[in-house]
């Protein structure tokens, strides 16, 4: 099974992704984790990624596609994966054509996302209020059209991400179990 988790920052993608790994025994891959790991490297791309991420900006489509598609070539992803944070733009979704069975959209309001993010401790440079608000704005501009793209393709599952963690997980599984 090839899944994508989409949602605003703070929607619970990584929490649900880790639960889904346990249940479905497929690996979880977060574009944010990949980019942050690379940003720690003392390389040219690492320094560039660190600046880009810490400003709250999105990594450009060409770089994102190159990095993610290379990662997905690894043998551990050949039987499926749970992908978080990609695709973020329609350009990425179109280039990723055929790379997904279902897309789970964890629907959470901006207010709820900000409340969740403000309430958790973080030492990440990309979790300043300014960077978070910028990414929320970018989500609405660039990623909401991706949701519509997958809706038209009949691959979208919408889940109320403001429910309890357990209820969100149950709602996701109820939909995914229909695929078996």
Image (cartoon, rainbow, N blue to C red):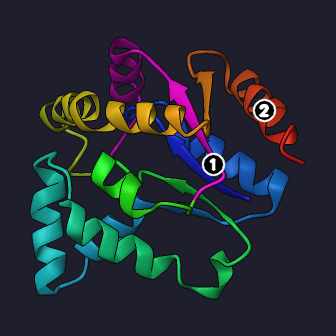
Q: Any mark on residue 134, and which? A: none
Mark toward the start of the polypeptide (2 vs 1): 1
Residue 105, picture quadrant: top right
For disc 1, the marked residue is 17
| C-alpha span from label 2 to label 1 | 15 Å
Q: Nearer the viewer, residue 16 or 178?
A: 178
Q: Residue at x 43, y 75 (%)?
A: 69
State the extent of the magenta-drawn residues as a range.
Answer: 100-123
Q: Is residue 54 left or right of residue 146?
A: left
Q: How many marks?
A: 2
Above or below — where is 67 with respect to 107? below
The secondary structure type at the circle numbered 1 is helix
Please give the name of the residue rendered at 17% of the width and 85% of the height, measured from the top-left corner: 42
Residue 174's spot in the image, x, y percent? 83, 30
Q: Nearer the viewer, residue 34 or 172?
A: 172
Q: Is residue 89 visible?
A: no
Mark 2 and mark 1 residues within 8 Å of each other at the beta carbon: no
Relative image position of residue 12 (x, y in whole percent): 53, 35
Q: Please name the residue that numbered disc 2 is placed on.
A: 175
Q: Residue at x 14, y 48 (%)?
A: 57
x, y percent for residue 140: 27, 27
**Which structural element holds mark 2?**
helix
Nearer to us of marks 2 and 1 is 2
For residue 120, side relative to residue 141 (left or right)? right
Q: Is residue 179 visible?
A: yes
Label 1 neighbour load within 10 Å: few <14, some 14-19, many 20+: many
Q: Quadrant of the N terminus?
A: bottom right
**Quadrant assignment, res 156:** top right
Say above or below: 97 vs 84. Answer: below
Left or right: residue 80 versus residue 99 is right
């Amino acid at each position: 099974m090839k899944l994508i988790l989409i949602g605003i920052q703070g929607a619970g993608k990584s929490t649900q992704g880790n639960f889904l790994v346990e249940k479905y025994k497929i690996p979880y891959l977060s574009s944010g984790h990949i980019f942050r790991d690379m940003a720690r490297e003392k390389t040219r791309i690492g320094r560039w990624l660190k600046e880009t991420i810490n400003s709250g900006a999105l990594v450009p489509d060409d770089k994102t596609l190159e990095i993610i598609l290379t990662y997905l070539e690894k043998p551990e992803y050949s039987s499926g994966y749970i992908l978080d944070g990609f695709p973020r733009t329609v350009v990425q979704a179109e280039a990723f054509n055929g790379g997904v069975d279902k897309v789970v959209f964890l629907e959470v309001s901006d207010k709820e996302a900000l409340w969740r993010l403000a309430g958790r401790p973080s030492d990440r440079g990309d979790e300043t209020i300014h960077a978070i608000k910028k990414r929320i704005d970018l989500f609405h501009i660039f990623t909401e059209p991706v949701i519509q793209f997958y809706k038209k393709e009949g691959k979208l599952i919408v889940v109320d991400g403001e429910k309890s963690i357990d209820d969100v997980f149950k709602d996701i599984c109820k939909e995914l179990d229909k695929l078996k």
